[in-house]
Amino acid sequence: MDTDARDKFVGNWTCNEKVNGTAMSTFTVTISKSVTVTNTTDILMANFYQLGNNFKAIAQVNGNNVTIASQNIDGFTVSGSGSMSGTTTITLNYTADDGSGAKNITDTYTK
């Protein structure tokens, strides 16, 4: 039986977020698998960028790597990438732009 590379990403994660290098906030992000049959590598990240649980970023998983293709979430254009180290830490680097200029974001998710 094949294992699903997304399984290790699924769950509730504590996010420590830095914006332009400055620690800003800590909050929970919930990661789930996309149920779309055609996108078996997609995960959904609820409360991404602390926008609320109703807003989800879509990311693609390839092994331990995550890619966030450019997308609009609640008026913010986001894109970036990251990776999982071990089984308890995910580091993401991405940009978020609401039209007033891009911010460089570093998120560290821990379980």
Image (tube, helix red, strand yellow):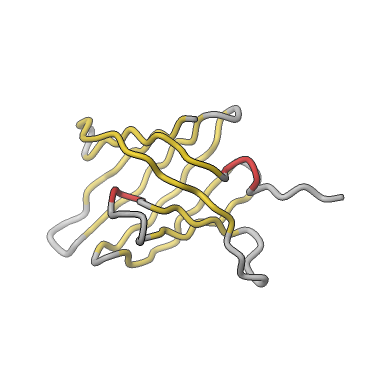
Q: Position of residue 65 (x, y in %)?
A: 57, 44
- Which of the 4 image quarters holds residue 91? top left
Relative to 33, say whether 25 is above or below: above
Q: Relative to 27, is 80 on the left or the right?
A: right
Q: Relative to 78, is 32 on the left or the right?
A: right
Q: Position of residue 46 (x, y in %)?
A: 41, 53
Numbered disc total = 0
Q: Residue at x 40, y 59 (%)?
A: 56
Spot the residue most to the right.
1
Relative to 16, say whether 75 is above or below: below
Residue closest to the eye, 52 or 22: 52
Q: Relative to 43, is 24 on the left or the right?
A: left
Q: Position of residue 85 (x, y in %)?
A: 56, 30
Q: Residue at x 29, y 63 (%)?
A: 77
Relative to 97, say whether 88 is above or below: above
Residue closest to the eye, 3 or 80: 3
Spot the residue most to the left.
100
Q: Residue at x 40, y 34 (%)?
A: 14
Q: Position of residue 70 (x, y in %)?
A: 39, 63
